[in-house]
Structures are given as structure tokens and as C-alpha cells.
Amino acid sequence: MESKTITPVEVKLGFKWQGLLLSFLVGLAIWLIPIPEGLSTKAWGMLALFVATIVTIIAKAMPMGAATLVALVISGLTGLTPLSPKQGEVGMLSGFANGTIWLIAIAMFLSRAVIKTGLGKRIALYFVARFGKKMMGVAYGMALADVVIGPGIPSASARGGGIMYPIMQSIADAYDSKPGPTARRAGSFLAIAVSQIDTIVCTMFLTAMAGNPLIAELAKGQGVEITWMTWFLGAIVPGVISLIVLPYFVYLIYPPELKDTPKMAEMAREELRNMGPMSKAEWILALDFILLLFLWTVGDLVFHIPATVSAFIGLVILLLTNIMSWKNIVAETTAWDTMFWFAVLVMMANALNKYGAIAWISSHISSSVGAFSWPVAFTILVLVYFYTRYFFASAMAHISAMYLAFVAAAIAVGTPPIIAALGLGYTSTLSMSLTQYAGGPGPALYGSGYNSTGQWWGVSFITSIISLIIWFGAGGLWMKLLGWW
């Protein structure tokens, strides 16, 4: 009998004890505070557990999925969310039956096909070949490519870090722009420009960033229904203006030393020639995405096909044509991980809302700005919500911790519900470009070494002011034309 050596399993702490201790103490401190008048024991207990979970995530004491699993078990054991809920209670596993959670997971499966077939790279190279003779043309070419692939890849990291970053790096290398003395030749500008572009694209489409469907789901708790088309319709005008203005603004305040890049267009064309004509898999995938965009924009309105069902249709097509095998889907650990913690956070947010904790928090927030007219009060809430992103290293932590309470407060001071939900929703994603750690492609682009922390923060802060003016100035007027306020 053949003997096999079993590798010993190392037994050690599966968490950072300092971070977990901090979250435990924070949760315990909240729990020990006398329950405020008007709140039930369940509402206060869920608030303590939720805050402790967010602290665990922010402190990175455990992976996000593990942190939410612990929270799920505690909520079930303590009866905060029973496995078999009665009327007025929220079920422990109710989040896993949520359609929005499946939408984002399926979109992640589809995004893997874009990378696997090379279609995303081909699209990016095509636009760089067309517009890449000048540095601004390179930026706009990458913006157009990001817009094309954005709706089907719900990960800023995958698009910005997996597709755009290698192309940006090759451009910098072609012109001998390295971290250090030659960084400003091309690399410094391109890294920040790509970060800004990817953030804008994340904000334009409901399925371009994992946090957006979470926002849509949380908005339901305030009676606001955000469909794929609603999100896109509100974002299209400020989004297009931002894609035109912000790269050029970065070019003006943080200019590259190189203005002309004739080699880049030729390099992109050469790479496209090496890739050969579009494969059958790429054609099927391209047609599949066209079908999905049609169903997401028209299907819900005309045929009453929910966005999640449309996503399932797109996935089945890829399964039947073997572009994505079942093994590929099972192996897509990021999607399953996202789906798990997403489901738990949605369940906890629903419980906070149903038990009355959100109404209690929002009443305190709204009372602090209630003396102002709703446009002024909403502006204050947006600015506070936007710039608190400096304290969060995760988009999901920021959204989970603050979005629902701020939306409820905005509505309470008289902001039209759709404006409150979408305005703060767009703000959630736009704030991603503030720092190199706030999420999206920032870690990869900053990690390339072309920019110092001071350069990144300085340019991003100035750009954020222009971005907010566009989204709440031009965007506000656009929503007025749509009759939303």
C-alpha cells in the first residue's frame, strides 16, 4: 500500500487579535449603554453587532467573509435574526435569497470570461491604437475602452488593475518612464488618470462596481427602487462630462513631460495584429454582452425581465458554449466570497432598518442639519459622506457603515427620495479615487511607484472638487430635466 505523507496543518490564530479585541470592546461598549427610548433590545443588539463587524472589517482583523460569518453566527445564536423568523423579524439566511446578491455574483462570473477570452484587452488596445498618438488621446482611448467593458465587469480592480494597468505600464516603459526621476514623463499622469477614469465608469453603471447593487438594495429599505436603467439614466450626463473634463483637468494640473506618443499607437496596432482576428469565443461573448445590455436597459421596462434573470440568461449562454465551464464558475472564489459577505451585510442592514435602528440614527443626523433648506442640508450630508472616505480602506465598509443612515437623514430633511438615494449612491463610488487605499484600482496603480502619497492625495483632492461640481451641478440640472425633483 502506497503511503502518502500528510502535510502537517499549522495551528495558529486565524485573526489579528488586536483588531478583534478592539471590535469586541466597541460592540460590548455599545451593548452596555442603556437602550435609548424608543428602541427595542433587538434593535440595540443588532446595532452593537453591526458596528463591531464594521470595526473588524476596517481593522482587517479577519477577511471580510470570515468577519461576516462570525457576525452571522452571533446574530443567529442570540436570536437577533432567527433561522425561522416570525412576523416582524428578519431571517438569519434571508440575505442569500436576495436577487441583487446573485446579480453581482453572476456579473463577476461574466467578467472572468472577458479576461479569459482576451476581449477586454482587445477592446482597450483598439481604442489606444485609434487615439494613442498623443498622451491625452491615450487617456481618452482608455476611457472609451473602460466604458465599453465597464457594464460587464463589476470590479474596478479587475478592469483598472487587470486590463488597464498592464497597458498603462507598457506605455510608460515604451517611453522609458520609470518610478523615480523619469516618472513624470508618462507614468505619473497615466496612473492617476486611469484611477480617475475607472472611478467615473464605476459610478456610471449599476453593474460596474460591486458596491452599487448593495446601494440599490439598501435604498429599497427607504422605499426607493433603483433599477439598472434608473442608475444609468441618472449618471449618463455627469458621467460623460466627467470623462471629458477630469482627464484633461489632471493633464493641466499634473502634466506629463511627454505630450506626443506616436510609438504607442503603433505598439497597440502591433499587439492587435499579434492577437489575430476575433475568435469565435470573443464574438459569442460580445453578442452575449449586447444582449445583456439590451435586457438590462429595455427588458425590465418592456418585457418585465428582472436584471438578475437577465444576468442568469447571459451566464447560461456562456455555459452552453463552453466559454465558461462549470469548473470555471466554481473556481471563481472572489465571486463566491463577495456573494457571502454581501448577503450577510444586506441581512444585517435589513434588520437594522426593520427593527428601527436606522430611523433612530437618521433622526439624530437630520436634526443636526434640519435648520437648513433641503438643498443646503443635502449638500452638507454629501460632503461629510464623501470626505469621510479618507477613514475607510474599503468601499463596502464605507457603504455598509454610512449609506443607509445618510439616505434616511437626507429624506427626512426633505430631499426627494430618488435624489437622496442616487446622489449618495454616486458619491459612494466617486469617493473611491480620493486615496490609493480607498478601493478599486488604486492599490495597483499607486503600487506601480510613479506617484508619492502626497502627489496622489493632492491631485485627487483637487480633482474631487471638480468631480462633485459636475455630478451635483450638471447632474442635478439633468435630474431636474428628468423630473426627479
Image (tube, rainbow, N blue to C red):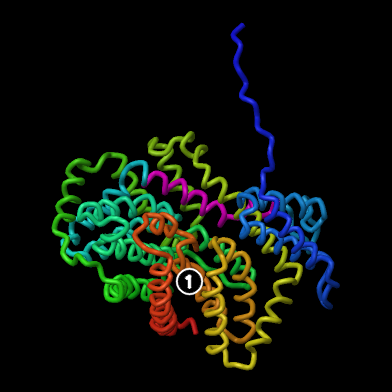
Q: Amino acid at mark 1?
A: Tyr
Residue 12 found in image quarter: top right
Where residue 391 sits: x, y (%)? 57, 68
Quadrant that contains the N terminus: top right
Side of 155 relative to 359 (left or right):
left
Where residue 278 sits: x, y (%)? 24, 43
Q: Nearer the viewer, residue 462 or 273?
A: 462
Where residue 366 sits: x, y (%)? 66, 84
The magenta segment: 93-114
Q: Which residue is under mark 1?
A: 426
Q: Which residue occupies 60% across, 55% down?
A: 342
Tell which residue pokes out farthest to the front in this image.
181
Q: Which residue occupies 52% across, 47% down?
A: 335
Q: Which residue occupies 19% across, 65% down?
A: 258
Label 1: which secondary element: helix
Please name the predominant secondary structure of the magenta segment in the image.
helix
Side of 261 relative to 390 (left or right):
left
Is residue 113 found inside the magenta-colored segment of the image? yes
In this rendering, the answer to whether 207 lies above or below 412 is: above
Q: Which residue occupies 55% across, 82% down?
A: 416
Residue 292 visible (yes or no)? no
Residue 158 visible (yes or no)? yes
Q: Across the whole image, how many numbered discs are drawn on residues?
A: 1
